[in-house]
Image: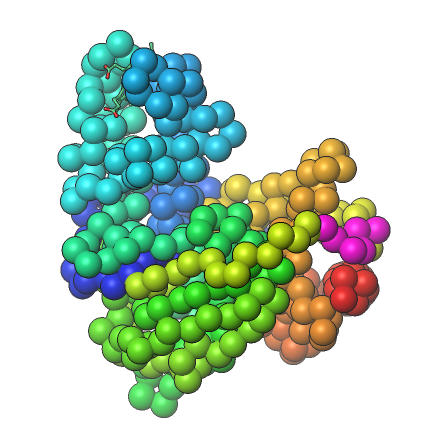
Amino acid sequence: MKLVRLNKISTGLRISSLGGALLTLAIAPGCNDSSSGDMTQPDVSPTAIFETLAKPQLVQSCANCHDRPQGSVATFLAEGTEYQSITNYENGKFINVPGANQSVLLAKGAHTGPAFEPDQYAAVQGWIEAEIAARPSNVNGMMKSALLPTAPITTGDFNMNFGNEAPINDPQANITFHLAPDSSNFYRVSKLTLTAGPTTGIHIKHPKFYFITNSASFADPADSLGIVDLSVPANGSATIGTGTVLLTNAPSNDPNTRIGIAFESLTQSMVQPVQVACKDFKDFNPALVKDLQGCAATCHGGRNGAATSAYDMKLSTSTDMAMLMSFCVSSLGRINKQDPAKSILLLQAIPQAQGGTANHPFKYSVAADITRFTTEVTTWAAGEK
Ligand code: HEC
């Protein structure tokens, strides 16, 4: 889940210029599959917009110089880590601005390098607006936190994974919750849980849900987790607050709305010097990897930003063992070693009638596929215990 970042968010933060053409582009590469319904989930998460819209332009026109220092100007398009590079450049100089037009990245114009073409400008502008909306750190009194994936507002079980992103940087760390409408038709979050991975404890203060629509990003006014100040040790897990939040202001009638979590503060604590590796790689690769390659080809390999940001499976198609081992490690956050049959990796892909989640757009439907995938996931998860 790459949907988070934030600290107190103020209402009315707008993604003003995330207009027509841009959104269409962000949404178009969905993974429609007529046999399983419309699997497209529009993705307005900044990382996805960066990957699909801004990065191709920046790489094409700017990276031949800015993939290395230019005089006193440090590298901001390091090859292979463009997103980290450009967002971290001079402590976020390009994105910590009140409006995208004030970013020197857009304002620079022709210099030793070229100015942006208008369509390039629009793409980069859309991305910066999304960053601004997603980082309430840009608003007075808020501090930036990690990016967590966002989730659509639908009934189901969600797993937001901290991934390899600062500040947590442990792909086995998650926030999980269940989402469903309550009797008065407000969406209710329940079973809200923070789980730390093996490499670091996590400290959170004042988490807050916020919504992203096509035109705006705003916090839920309920703000019932204001007093939460929670530390979870490495490998630990704890309920956040009472575990329940009533979202009183979720936009209704907008299927494109996504939900994210921001924090007043989100930090590592008691970092553990452990080397993380899969214990049971032989049950992960090749059997399970083969199935995940199918998911990568349809949605999780980059074609759908929301899906890829939730669980990036690009490495599944690698033939390099080290890459596959790293894919294994990044997949550990989706299994339940104590109770393999409860692994989110399994529940997302099997039908609800068999205990699967309600919300995942793809489900295996052929009995043999369900059996095979179930065996693969449970065998591997048990082997990782
Ligand atoms: C031919 C090499 C070259 C290319 C291509 C190039 N630049 Fe530059 N850029 C430079 C040099 C040299 C500097 C440092 C001198 C200056 O600031 O003008 C620089 C500086 C900058 C700065 C100033 C950074 C700061 O912290 O003030 C920005 C912003 C910038 N470039 C953006 C871009 C963008 C956007 C593109 C692509 C559209 C691009 N550059 C393409 C050479 C290049």
| Range shown magenta | 277-282
Instruction: Point out the image quarter for the C terminus.
Output: bottom right
Residue lying at 22% horizontally and 12% vertically, measured from the top left: 111
> Ligand 1 sits in which quadrant?
top left
Q: Nearer the viewer, residue 151 or 174?
A: 174
Q: Is residue 149 above or below residue 206?
A: above
**Residue 253 shows up from this direction:** no
Is 366 colored magenta in this rendering? no
Residue lying at 75% horizontally and 47% vertically, measured from the top left: 290
Name the residue at the bottom extreme.
183
Residue 108 image position (x, y, % from top left): 20, 22
Quarter of the image where one finds residue 65: top left
The color scheme shown is rainbow
**Residue 364 shows up from this direction:** yes
Residue lying at 32% horizontally and 13% vertically, measured from the top left: 71
Q: Is residue 151 left or right of residue 135?
A: right
Residue 147 image position (x, y, % from top left): 41, 52
Q: Is residue 253 left or right of residue 310?
A: left
Residue lying at 31% horizontally and 78% vertically, measured from the top left: 227
Name the residue at the top extreme.
112
Quarter of the image where one finds residue 41: bottom left
Q: Is residue 385 above or below residue 282?
A: below
Is 279 colored magenta in this rendering? yes
Residue 143 image position (x, y, % from top left): 28, 55
Q: Nearer the viewer, residue 341 or 370?
A: 341
Of helix, strand and loop, which mostly describes the magenta segment? Answer: loop
Q: Nearer the viewer, residue 22 or 91?
A: 91
Q: Is residue 251 left or right of residue 316?
A: left
In this figure, what is the number of numbered marks? 0
Quarter of the image where one finds residue 106: top left
Residue 114 image position (x, y, % from top left): 27, 13
